Image (cartoon, rainbow, N blue to C red):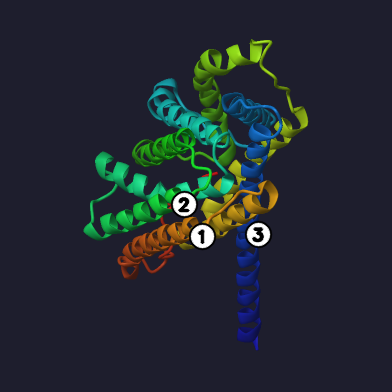
Amino acid sequence: MAMNEQEKHTNREFYIQGAITYGYISLWVFLSAIVIMLNKYVLAYAAFPFPIALTLTHMAFCSGLAFLLIKAGLVEAVHMDTPTYIKTIVPIAALFSGTLWLGNAAYLYLSVAFIQMLKATMPVTVFTVGVFMGTEKYSGMYALNMVVVAIGVATASYGELNFNLVGVLFQGGSIVTESFRLCLIQLLLQARGIKLNPVTTLYYIAPACFGFLCFPFTFIELPKMLNPETEWRIPGGWLLLSAFTAFALNMSVFMLIGRSSALTMNVAGVIKDWLLILLSVMLYRSPVATLQLCGYGVAFAGVCWYNYQKLQGVRAPAPSRSSSDPEKTSLLHEKSQSA
């Protein structure tokens, strides 16, 4: 009888923890979709075509809120000396600012649906950069997966009805900088054993991103904003909502990484990508051709097979670690769902 009660308690705890995890997943998918759709609206439809200024707004808001949370004692601060900050945080922040700027700039030229299709190349670039930087070992099978993904994305690009080379270059640059950033996180933060919680991560990285973004903003967007012939306005409410949602998204990402497996994250990412493609078609009337969907389907299959191989590689040494979850691994190489 006591065993039955214990089993019931264990099952109840299992379902509670599962519900919490999938609640985090749902929140992440929802916030990610909201941030992307808001950014697209602000840049393309709200008369505010300034992606650097939008990103600056996000970084300023995240910096300020993280500062207040830490100084108010609501979040435990993590001390970091100046040399460590310069060697680890500054390079990562430089790449992160490039990722956000170039990714937001792509919304001026491309549909949300097509951008999500292009993001399928993230495993290709992470694998390539990882081999170059020594965080990934070359494998013929992995390389074959990358070729399949590249062919699929190329087909989707060929079928894109509103193809714009400038937008593709912006998005491609965003993917490349994000790939280098992910590899640097593994080389610098993880190798040095630096552990940051979600708020302290933004506390250190967001101000540095803001500083880096001030340079291109001063020379690229500020002159346009000061030009009396340029027609634009400040969508204050939308900017504030976008910044707050971006902060919440960052929080949800770190919370989810702490609770979920790589497999769960990838399945959630696939759901998010298809959801965004659907929302783009419904809300912004983005045209999607059959050839484009077929190409994305091929890329999608390549990404799924790549993720499966990675997870199989993680499971291999599992018998010698009976207390660990075989799916638990660094999400570095599976993070192809960047907002």
Secondary structure category for the residue under label 1: helix
Q: Quadrant of the N terminus?
A: bottom right
Is there a contact, CB below 8 Å, between mark 2 and mark 3?
Answer: no
Q: Please name the residue shown 64% across and 15% down the image.
A: 225
Disc 1: which residue: 290
- Whether residue 335 is visible to the viewer of this picture, yes or no, is no
Q: Disc 2 and disc 3: Cα gap in Å?
A: 36 Å
Q: Which residue position is annotated with label 2?
A: 159
Q: Is 129 left, or right, of 290 in this rendering?
A: left
Q: Position of residue 227 (x, y in %)?
A: 64, 11
Q: In screen coordinates, is 167 left or right of 51?
A: left
> Which label sits on residue 301?
none
**Nearest to viewer (mark 2 / mark 3):** 2
The answer to whether mark 1 and mark 2 are in CB contact below 8 A is yes
On the image, which quarter does residue 42 sit in?
top right
The numbered disc on residue 23 is 3
SS state under label 2: helix
Residue 18, x across and y down, in percent: 61, 66
- Which image quadrant is residue 2 in? bottom right
Q: Residue furthest bottom?
A: 1
Label 3 and label 1: CA atoms lie apart by 34 Å
Q: Nearer the viewer, residue 147 or 249?
A: 147
Q: Is residue 199 left or right of residue 88?
A: right
Q: Residues within 10 Å of mark 1 (few under 14, many from 20)?
A: few
Tell me where residue 214 appears, x and y as whole percent: 54, 17
For badge 2, the amino acid type reads Gly
Viewer-side residue, 177 vs 11: 177
Q: Amino acid at mark 3?
A: Gly
The residue depicted at 35 percent of the width and 54 percent of the height is: 151
Which badge, 3 or 1, comes first in the chain's sequence? 3
Where is 291 relative to 129, above or below? below
Q: Position of residue 95 (x, y in %)?
A: 43, 31
